[in-house]
Image (cartoon, grey):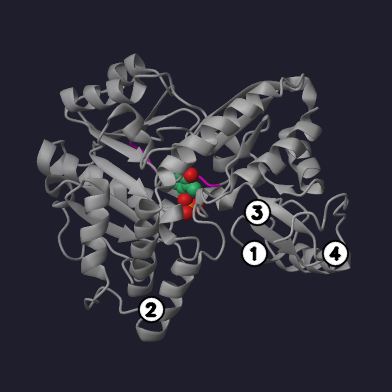
């Protein structure tokens, strides 16, 4: 798309935006507070709204759009598969499922996979896996299994998952909650070890906390936690739904510390930006606890999802998108740090997962997201003080340069 076209345009919401907003206000539950932009089409890293304004997408649907919007090869595979076979349920087999399982387990270095759709379903599946493994293999007494989680976690929105969130808003009004979880501080390996008891079956962790504010743990933390889990026979469960598949500059964020999780959860970008596709990967010993009928999903492992995930994984490795995120991200992070804005407390992140933490008196990050929108950049606050910058991994250097100028202007 032509980026110069809208230069200098204030991108004020126009009549079409107002019309759509009125519909949403009236007919949609208010469980989101979106920026005032109604996107009508997109290609690559650029989107266009219903009033014809163009924006650079630096949120990437929370990393679900690692390949950008409408990646031609992924769209082609999607359309081709949709014409041939889209859904069978797992009551029958389909000819995309076996190859998908082989390819994703090879990519992840794990023995087996259990496919689901949304990320939250993937997390739920991992929790069920850990509990069942705890009872069947580790020998924990019935209904006593405990799973350790981290303060500041975000793993999705089901009742069980919000049961162990420490964000009051995620929980308020949704009780009673699922028991069996213990919170420890994030980044503190000693606290993890101290929290482990005889009934502990798993430790669920994000290698970098995404929704928690792009929190990068201290160097060595993942490795230490992995080692502690192994020593106490506790499953190390990595939620790489946001950090996985190249986002942080390695295939998986755990790779930065050479850590192989016992259970790996993927989602978001696995669907190539077109479908909700999630997966739980583990060893045969761990996923082997499932028997037919224990768990399932009508859409999990459907041929359309498998075809899309297969081509997404192919593009990811063939086009070396993790390396691309590493090099583009490192340079971009340096330039953002070099802005030396008096409003910024810290710029942090890995690869193309970057958080700009604002100083308390700079005002809420959401206001900066709104001002960046006026400049033609779409991004989002995570916690109140942090702006998340996470463009598609296919972004061009010239677009990052363009963005840097505008971010500098807004933070200046
Ligand atoms: C987004 C996210 C989830 C939840 O995924 P959904 O597809 O929204 O259910 C879980 N864990 C992490 C780390 C995430 O970023």
For residue 81, which numbered disc appears in the image?
Answer: 2
Q: Residue at x 79, y 63 (%)?
A: 21
Marks 1/3: CA distance? 24 Å
For disc 1, the marked residue is 42
Front residue of this view, candidates 223 and 333: 333
Determine whether 131 is above or below 13 in the image.
above
Residue 264, image x, y percentages: 30, 44
- Expressed as whole percent of the image width and height from the top left, the position of residue 169 reads 61, 39
**Pointer 1 or 3: first along the chain:** 3
Q: Which residues are magenta?
A: 174-180
* The disc label shown at residue 31, or none: 3
Q: Is residue 226 magenta?
A: no
| Disc 2 to disc 1: CB gap under 8 Å | no
Q: Is residue 155 visible?
A: no
Which residue in the protein does label 4 denote?
Answer: 18
Nearer the observer, disc 1 or disc 3?
1
| Horizontal relation, residue 14 to residue 156: left or right | right
Residue 85 image-quadrant placement: bottom left
Q: CA distance from mark 4 to mark 1?
A: 20 Å
């Amino acid at each position: 798309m032509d980026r110069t076209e809208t230069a200098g345009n204030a991108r004020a919401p126009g009549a079409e935006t107002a019309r759509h907003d009125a519909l949403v206000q009236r007919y949609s539950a208010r469980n989101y507070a979106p920026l005032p932009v109604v996107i009508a089409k997109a290609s690559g890293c650029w989107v266009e709204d219903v009033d014809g304004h163009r924006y650079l997408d630096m949120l990437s649907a929370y990393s679900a759009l690692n390949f950008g919007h409408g990646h031609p090869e992924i769209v082609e595979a999607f359309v081709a598969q949709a014409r041939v076979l889209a859904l069978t349920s797992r009551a029958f087999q389909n000819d995309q499922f076996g190859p998908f399982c082989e390819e994703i387990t090879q990519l992840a270095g794990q023995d087996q996979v259990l496919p689901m759709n949304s990320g939250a379903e993937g997390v739920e599946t991992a929790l069920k896996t850990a509990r069942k493994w705890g009872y069947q293999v580790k020998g924990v007494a019935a209904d006593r299994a405990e799973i350790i989680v981290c303060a500041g976690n975000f793993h999705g929105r089901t009742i069980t998952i919000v049961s162990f969130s420490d964000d009051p808003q995620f929980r308020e009004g949704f009780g009673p909650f699922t028991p069996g979880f213990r919170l420890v501080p994030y980044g503190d390996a000693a606290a993890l070890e101290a929290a482990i008891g005889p009934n502990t079956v798993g430790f669920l962790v994000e290698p970098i906390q995404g929704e928690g504010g792009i929190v990068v743990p201290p160097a060595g933390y993942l490795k230490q936690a992995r080692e502690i889990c192994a020593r106490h026979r506790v499953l190390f469960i990595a939620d790489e739904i946001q950090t996985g598949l190249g986002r942080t500059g390695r295939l998986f964020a755990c790779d930065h510390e050479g850590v192989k999780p016992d259970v790996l959860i993927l989602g978001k970008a696995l669907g190539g930006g077109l479908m909700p596709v999630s997966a739980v990967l583990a060893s045969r010993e761990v996923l082997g606890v499932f028997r037919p009928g224990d768990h399932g999903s009508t859409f999990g492992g459907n041929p359309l999802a498998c075809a899309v995930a297969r081509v997404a994984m192919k593009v990811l490795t063939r086009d070396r998108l993790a390396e691309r995120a590493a090099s583009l991200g490192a340079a971009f992070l340096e330039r953002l740090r070099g802005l030396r804005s008096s409003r910024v407390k810290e710029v942090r992140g890995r690869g193309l997962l970057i958080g700009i933490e604002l100083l308390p008196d700079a005002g809420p990050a959401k206001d900066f997201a709104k001002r960046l929108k006026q400049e033609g950049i779409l991004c989002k606050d995570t916690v109140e003080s942090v702006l998340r910058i996470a463009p598609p991994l296919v972004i061009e250097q010239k677009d990052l340069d363009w963005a840097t100028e505008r971010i500098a202007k807004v933070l200046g």
